[in-house]
Amino acid sequence: MTGPRENPFYLLELPPECTRADVERQGQKLLGMLELGLPGAATHPTPAGARPRDADGVRWAMAELRDPARRLAHEATAQLPARMDPGSTTTPPSGEPRGPAGVPGLLMAAGWGRAP
Amino acid sequence: MMPWGAIAGAVAAMTLNKREGQSRLPAHAAVMWLACVAGFIAAGRWPSLPSLVGSLTGLAVCLVPWWFARRVCVPLGWHRAAWYLASADDITWTRDHCGAGALAAAWAVLHQRGDRARALGWVRDRLARESPLRGAGVVALGLLEAAQGRRDQARAWLTDADATHELATPAAARRLAAEWRALDAAERGDWDAVVELGRSASPRTALTRWLGHVGERLQGASLERRWSMAAWWLLAGRWRVTWPLMRRAWAPAAVAEAVVAPVAAFRPPEDVAARTRVPLLALAQARLDWVSARAAASGDDVAAAAAAWDSALAHPDVKAWMHQRAALLGVTDLPGARAALEDDVVERLLALARGGSARLPEAAEGAGTVATRVTWEARHALLEEVELACEAFRTRAEVRAALPSPDEWAAWLGLRDAVDAAMRRGGPGFRRLAFRAVNQSLTPWAVWLWNERKERPLAHEAFRWMATQASDAGDESAQALHEKNAACGI
């Protein structure tokens, strides 16, 4: 199942100002597409790039958006536009320092065993 | 002809009749050999040349069994012979003979090709019968892990062996453990660790010292240091293997420029005001997504994201937007909806804070609800983990559920590393809080180990570690108690 960490608006590919009817229509459409195994339904865009999508996730998203209080919370965390490629804003490069390179195979060469 | 079989039998019988783990193989062998040769000469019979050469070889094996174990049995992968010879040594290993045997046997297993399962099982079975386990046995357990390809675990065991008290770990075991760790660190390019191992005042092999010098050169030590590096290289031997690294460190341009990737800083999305309806919420969301995408989120990153959410949720524009949306959606309980949003954000931030190994976020003075909750809930969860882990030791001590020596060491290592990591992550305030739980649970366990199970090396380690923890936590009475316990010896 697509985890509850997903934002239902991104998962259903709907804007936060969509109506309740939009939610139901889009949800049913995606469920049908997933059942038929259409390739476009298997992933969805988020601000951090494409994420997988499945039928359980779609049902969970529809249920979340039916509850007005939950929907308001999700609207607040669906402000950024979604995209299929991971954007530079959300995928920072690693800040790991890199020093002089190591010496592969030194342990065995120095007499501490051999490959089994 | 000389009765070599009888001589060997007598030597073995005398050797097996050892007391307090002391082997007397070299002395017994030498005395028996000399007595027999003298007897034959006195009787006017000269031993034949082949039997003399054979007996001299046997005598050499008996005199320096560790040398034969290390130079012959280990490279050939003869784990049983390595065990018996190494455990009979009295020159290199003046104590912990069983551990010496286990270490040599584990080292021999490392040299075996093909299926090592039987040999591993044999060494493990023998080790499990030994109690208490001392430092050389701990090194052996590390090498057994390495023989199974589990380098991280091997590293943890060998680090522990090097950190144990000198009475628990013979100098030879300490040297070998450090050499393995230095070579392993050099393989991984962890030159800081290599330098630290090479500089240590503890016993080290020449190879470890040389690697330490190499690490210093590669990290920018002056060219003058090359001569002491060369001296250690000559002493270390294994020149063919180490020559490429020696040449690399010797070259004037050896010092690699430390390439440090720029530490990424958060960049707000472009045109956020124009492209989003509630820019403050969009910025808070962008920061949260940015932290989530980091390989290892630091406590500061998480704290900054929490602060961004606090300031967004407290802003009048966001409050107005929430009122407006709540009215449109028909939300009757706006505070409840706001709390649900806070819960979602806190849950995501907590997952980030707890997931990594970085220091936990700390809320600044006067921080908002999200930052404060993340700070305290992360510490609370970490404290619960520590309490639960320590409680298991206390319960085991209460019901007298003893584990075999290697398993007891493994359990201790796992707990100590987990608590150390938790203490580092939690900071000073957490340390004081967590130490109470550690002290209450581990003291009965360590006392039980010492008094009843006679696992003194392990109990000693536990007391020493708790004394350090007590000192860091500022608990003077506990520190005095554990120092007194540790002073009881091994």
Image: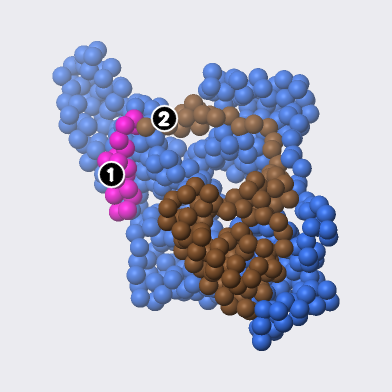
Chain colours: A brown, B blue
Q: Quadrant of residue B427?
A: bottom right
Position of residue B422 relative to residue B156, above or below, is below
Q: Quadrant of residue A26?
A: bottom right
* Mark 2 surroundings: few (<14), some (14-19) or many (≥20) residues within 10 A: some
Q: Amino acid at mark 2?
A: Arg
Question: Which residue is at the front of the view, A48 or B242?
Answer: A48
Position of residue B9 relative to residue B135, above or below, is above
* Mark 1 surroundings: few (<14), some (14-19) or many (≥20) residues within 10 A: some
Residue reaching furthest to the top: B49
Q: Amino acid at mark 1?
A: Trp
Q: Say the numbered circle drawn on residue B22.
A: none
Which element carries disc 2, helix, strand or loop?
loop
The N terminus of chain B is located in which quarter? top left
Residue B266 image point, x, y percent: 77, 53
Residue interval drawn in magenta: B112-129
**Are labels 2 and 1 assigned to the same chain?**
no
Question: Which residue is at the front of the view, B267 or B490?
Answer: B267
Most common secondary structure along the magenta stretch: helix
Question: Which residue is at the front of the view, B451 or A105?
Answer: A105
* Residue under pointer 1: B122
Residue B202 image point, x, y percent: 60, 44
Which element carries disc 1, helix, strand or loop?
helix
* Residue under pointer 2: A114
Residue shown at 42%/56% (left/top)? Answer: A35
Instruction: Chain letter for mark 1, please.
Output: B
Residue B411 image point, x, y percent: 44, 60
